[in-house]
Amino acid sequence: MNQVAQNPIGIFDSGLGGISVVRAMMELLPDERLIYFGDTARVPYGSKSNETVRRFSRQIVNFLLDHQVKMVVVACNTASAIALDDLRGRWNLPIIGVIEPGATAAVNKSPSNRVGVIGTTSTIHSGAYEKALLTRNPNLNIQSKACPLLVPLVEEGWPEDDVLTGVLERYLSGYKQSPVESLILGCTHYPYLKEAIQRVIGPDVNLIDSGEETARMVQDILIEKSMAHTPVGQDAARKHHFYVSDFPQRFQETASRFLGRPLENLFRIELEVLESYSVG
């Protein structure tokens, strides 16, 4: 038996949004055990300097490695854009972000080279998706749009009503004037609005859920490297673990809603402890 294959997969985000990636991985890879870290005390990462984002990311990867993870998924668009290369240069294990899988899927589903990207202001301004897309196909026509109101609407559990529809119509109006074939949901919160976004933008546009695409890439890597976990006996009942650096108001309720099931095995890690995992 490959002993490494029995180890968990580590996932981290600056907050709660990355639970959409956890949910996609639970559905696609039910035999894997997941360890999630949400840096809820220091969210958002988008307003931090690049070096601070890299430092926070290194601390969290070190924390996850203490739990013997066999792979790390950076389920944060900002950290994927800023810290991924630094992390890969420091540790010899598979480390993947959410930008590359989404970009690859969008290219594959856009035969006429028309791709849209929506995300937070920091993600759009970083140009990370444009860079990843153009690396794969330099002939793409890319339309990017920052949609800053969507994250708070998701976290507040805003119903799919006329207010949400009006916000989406305002943000997505440019894509109706200049249609795209694929639209990347470039924020881990956005999959929770997928049905509403599809209704507004129309049925002919392929919505690219970076969480789902990331789960598929994880599956491919596990198979390629013979690291997929095979349950043995009672091992099939292994539990996922969730760690956060703070418990914001209504955290449990919101996280459970994101996950689609009760959130169990939840633990808080004090910032002093997390910062002790710093590396140079």
Image (spheres, helix red, strand yellow):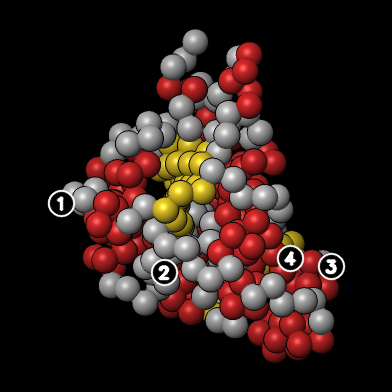
* Pick the front one: 275 or 52: 275
Q: Amino acid at mark 1?
A: Gly
Residue at 31%, 64% (x, y): give it: 53
Q: Is any atom of residue 112 visible in this view?
A: no
Q: Is any atom of residue 35 visible in this view?
A: yes
Which of marks 1 and 4 precedes in the sequence? 4
Label pair 1/3, CB-CB below 8 angstroms: no
Judged by depth in the image, the label closer to the viewer, 1 or 3, is 1
Which of marks 3 and 1 precedes in the sequence? 3
Q: Label 2, label 1: how many angstroms apart (C-alpha)?
A: 22 Å
Label pair 2/1, CB-CB below 8 angstroms: no
Which residue does the numbered mark 2 point to in the structure image?
43
Q: Amino acid at mark 2?
A: Val
Q: Label 3, label 4: how many angstroms apart (C-alpha)?
A: 12 Å
User: Which numbered tag is attached to residue 280?
Assistant: 1
Which of marks 4 and 3 precedes in the sequence? 4
When asked about the image quadrant of residue 172, the answer is bottom right
Residue 164 location (% of width, % of height): 74, 82
Residue at 28%, 39% (x, y): give it: 91
Judged by depth in the image, the label closer to the viewer, 2 or 3, is 2
Element type at mark 3: loop
Which residue does the numbered mark 3 point to in the structure image?
203
Which of marks 1 and 2 precedes in the sequence? 2
Element type at mark 4: helix
249 vs 85: above or below: below
Which residue does the numbered mark 4 point to in the structure image?
194
Q: Amino acid at mark 3?
A: Pro
* Pick the front one: 41 or 88: 41
Which of marks 2 and 4 precedes in the sequence? 2
Which of marks 3 and 2 precedes in the sequence? 2
Q: Is residue 231 left or right of residue 68?
A: right
Residue at 78%, 72% (x, y): give it: 196
